[in-house]
Amino acid sequence: MTDVRAMELSAAEEILRAEGFEVATFEVRSKKGVPGGDDKRVIRVRRDETGNTVYLAYSVFKTAVSRID
């Protein structure tokens, strides 16, 4: 299985599905989240007992640069 930690979520899902895995995702965040967040990144990967399903925990990050005037 390819290590998809820190990858963009949709790319990670695509890779794992191409390798024959079922993929389940869930968001991990603080109560407020990240205002203006624009980038979903995988932060944790777990497999079930049978090894067929991969669980991806992701967080939303703000990676776009904001201009301050």
Image (cartoon, grey):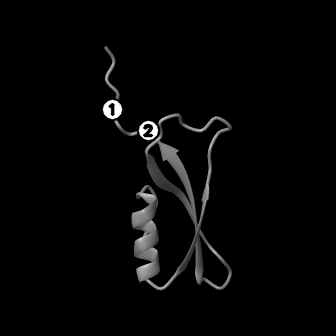
Q: Is residue 1 left or right of residue 67?
A: right
What residue does disc 2 label? 62
Figure check: 26 above or below 46: above
Q: Is residue 33 left or right of residue 7?
A: right
Q: Quadrant of residue 25?
A: bottom right
Query: Which image quarter holds the C terminus?
Result: top left
Please tell me in which quadrant of the rendered image residue 23 appears: bottom right
Residue shown at the point (35%, 28%) measured from the top left: 66
As measured in the structure, the alpha-carbon distance from the residue carrying label 2 to the one carrying label 1 is: 8 Å
Where does residue 11 sit, x and y in percent of width and height? 39, 65
Residue 64, image x and y in percent?
35, 37
Residue 1: in sight, yes or no? no
Q: Which mark is residue 65?
A: 1
- Residue type at mark 2 is Lys
Q: Residue 17: x, y in percent? A: 46, 79
On residue 22, the disc is: none
Q: Quadrant of residue 52?
A: bottom right
Give, as a three-letter code, the residue at label 1: Val
Q: Secondary structure at mark 2?
A: loop
